[in-house]
Amino acid sequence: MNPPEVDRVAASRAAVAARRARAAIKAAIAAGERNPLEVMRTAFEAPLGAEGKLRVTEFLTSIPAIGVTKMQRIMEDLGISPAKRLGGLGKHQRERLYDYLNDRLSSRQPAPAKLIVLAGPTAVGKGTVANHIRENHPDVLLSVSATTRAPRPGEEEGVSYFFVDDSEFDRMVEEGELLEWATVHNAHRYGTPRGPVEAALAAGSSVLLEIDIQGARSVRRAMPEARLVFLQPPSWEELVRRLVGRGTESASEQARRLETAKVELASVDEFDYQVVNGNVGEAAQEVVDLMKTRKAKR
Ligand SMILES: Nc1nc2c(ncn2[C@@H]2O[C@H](COP(=O)(O)OP(=O)(O)O)[C@@H](O)[C@H]2O)c(=O)[nH]1
Ligand SMILES: Nc1ncnc2c1ncn2[C@@H]1O[C@H](COP(=O)(O)OP(=O)(O)O)[C@@H](O)[C@H]1O
């Protein structure tokens, strides 16, 4: 071998060894054998060592409680670019990341959630579970949405929804009165009035939003402390049965909603909790428990 080739071989061996060292650190974090905070301290002291060369993205996802979605959110919240390595973080980024993980890892039990978003596919029973909570847990504020759709028989203004026309909805959007809003099922606009939610939270009450998945994503951006609950059907067949059994949509609309439901079911990983709506009372209790008790994340 001539000298440049020797250099290349040595360099590629060093690269393989470095990759192995990083993989070993990640495996040790994942197995609980190394404390992520200690790994960070080592990285900051020796930015060119194996710990320092770990990408922040791979470091975070090796921590058992953090999946890819959560990692992306942390990176976004802390303003860290995905290319960064632990050793390459600036002083403020180091402090923010360290404090974030320190808080998260040292409080073994999360605080009760005050703001819960209940979302899930069409006809899974979101409205039914929310109604059960309204009737049995009067201390929980159920946000009343504004909508541009017409009232159905039996629906009450200000209880089921605030029924507004397009121009009033435009005004609410323009004046920032909505915490989030979305066009649902390609048909009508729905939005969460900001005032009552903020007032209830300020007074220390628990608030439940029963909204669609786009809305859940918007609330997460606007209020990162919100916990997102995905209501699951016991099975796909049962979801179809509920949609057809409700009988409020035409056959073609049912088919369209079921197509959307497939996409919606695939978004479950974005949520903090899953609750299966087998029995309405039990599902409602599970949701309420998230607000009232210190319950471990699942
Ligand atoms: N983003 C958003 N979605 C909402 C809001 N209020 C209701 N929704 C959603 O709008 C969808 C349609 O609700 P509705 O017209 O009552 O018909 P449903 O499909 O029979 O429940 C449901 O998925 C609700 O979760 C809201 O304020 N914001
Ligand atoms: N746990 C449950 N078991 C059986 N049927 C249910 C259950 N929850 C809801 N349903 C029924 O399923 C249908 C859809 O429920 P709904 O609350 O309107 O769904 P969503 O608000 O998610 O669109 C309704 O006919 C409702 O009575």
Image (cartoon, grey):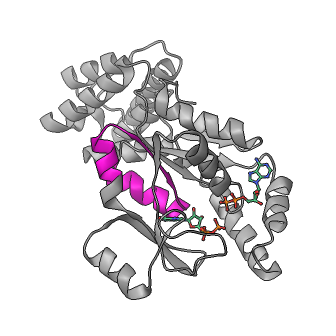
Q: Quadrant of the N terminus?
A: top left
The quadrant holding residue 57 is top left
Q: Is residue 150 above or below residue 146?
A: below
Q: Is residue 137 magenta?
A: no
Q: Position of residue 94 (x, y in %)?
A: 21, 32
Seen from this angle, which residue lies furthest top? 33
Q: Is residue 222 magenta?
A: yes
Residue 23 in view, yes or no: no
User: Where in the image, quadrant-wise, is ligand 2 located?
Assistant: bottom right
233 left or right of 274 in image: right
Q: From the viewer's side, name the closer residue of 187 and 7.
A: 187
Q: Residue at x 44, y 85 (%)?
A: 165
Seen from this angle, which residue lies furthest left? 91
Q: Position of residue 72 (x, y in %)?
A: 41, 47
Q: Residue at x 30, y 51 (%)?
A: 198
Q: Quadrant of the C terminus?
A: top right
Q: Residue at x 67, y 39 (%)?
A: 283
Magenta-drawn segment: 197-223
Q: Position of residue 268 (x, y in %)?
A: 61, 49
Q: Position of residue 267 (x, y in %)?
A: 59, 54
Looking at the image, how many numbered discs can be counted on the residues? 0
102 left or right of 273 in image: left
Q: From the viewer's side, name the closer residue of 272 and 82.
A: 272
Q: Residue at x 36, y 82 (%)?
A: 168
Q: Is residue 141 above or below residue 67?
A: below
Seen from this angle, which residue lies furthest bottom? 167
Residue 24 in view, yes or no: yes
